[in-house]
Image (tube, rainbow, N blue to C red):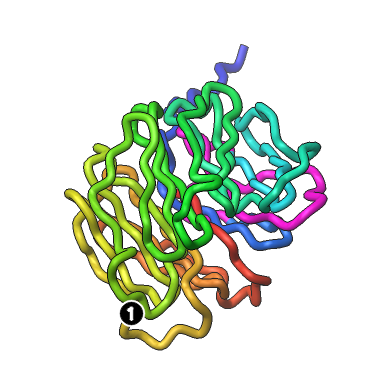
Amino acid sequence: MKARPRTRWRPRQWPPPGYRLVTADGRVTSYGQLATYQVPPLGSAAVGIASTPDGYGYWLALKGGGVRAAGDAHLYGSVSTAHLISPIVGIVATPNGQGYWLVARDGGVFGFGDAHYYGSAAGTPIGEPIVGMAATPDGRGYLLVSAAGAVVPFGDARSFGSVAAKHLNRPIVGFAVAADGRGYWMVAADGGIFTFGNAAFYGSVVNRHLNQPIVGLAASADGRGYWLVGADGGVFGFGDAHFYGSAVAQGSKTVVGIAA
């Protein structure tokens, strides 16, 4: 009997390096060692993307409150059948990937799976629409950020400052928390980076000529770098956030989010 050739078992890297971009029409493009998976028809425009902790799946958030799951991401619920006062603007996964939050433009927060509700900014006098959300490393809190750079913490989340009292040339469009939860970054549409707490500054594109405005920010796993993405799919990496490619040459429709 002929012996079968031996193959070396190689455990998959957790999480695989790379990032994903999503366009308003729901097209996801993966870079690095990340895969792209099919999702059911959207029904409304995509507004955000969140990866599972192991990187082998992701969720898409839709403007109308729907959620689409792909890969090893499980669907825990949505607000697609609810009457929303304000559209959804983002999605954030819990640290173990067994739940997620949706955040609305007016600061409303909706939790699914093990994503507990700790409060919302709906009805508060923040003065500007909410544009981003980030969870604490233990998943027992989250922070909301407005276009003016105001930060509102809930649960065990801490605020380390805001840019609301400063002059912004362009509105805030992206937000990410440091790996240990003791700081965070904000990015403005012109590529300017604002750091708070122990979140270090690694660079920005504020002095570069951008074809399209910046629309998102994602931090690397260890918090020693970050990526910025433009509406045209251009990606800029800083610190240990390596560049794996961009969607500029593909003539992408408007990119609305990035997940690492």
Q: Magenta segment: does it hold 236? A: no
- Quadrant in the picture for residue 189: bottom left
Image coords of residue 110 (percent x, y): 59, 35
Residue located 46% across and 29% down the image: 118
Badge 1 density bin: few <14, some 14–19, many ≥20, Cα 10 Å: some
Badge 1 is on which residue? 206
Q: Name above or below for residue 45 compared with residue 250.
A: above
Q: Which residue is found at the position 66% from the left and 27% from the top? A: 76
Q: Residue 182 at x, y = what percent?
A: 22, 41
Residue at figure coordinates x 62%, y 11% from the top left: 1
Q: What residue lies at 42% left-to-right and 30% top-to-bottom?
A: 95
- Whether residue 61 is situated above or below residue 166 in the rendered picture: above
Rendering coords of residue 128 (x, y %)? 49, 62
Give x and y (percent) for residue 29.
60, 57
Viewer-closest of 95 and 249: 95
Q: Which residues are magenta?
A: 30-57
Q: Is residue 92 above or below residue 226?
A: above
Say which amino acid is labelled 1.
Val
In the rendered view, does 231 fall on the left or right side of 147? right
- 190 vs 123, left or right, is left
Residue reaching furthest bottom? 209
Exactly how many numbered labels are in the figure? 1
Would you say residue 37 sits in the magenta stretch? yes
| Residue 136 image-quadrant placement | top left
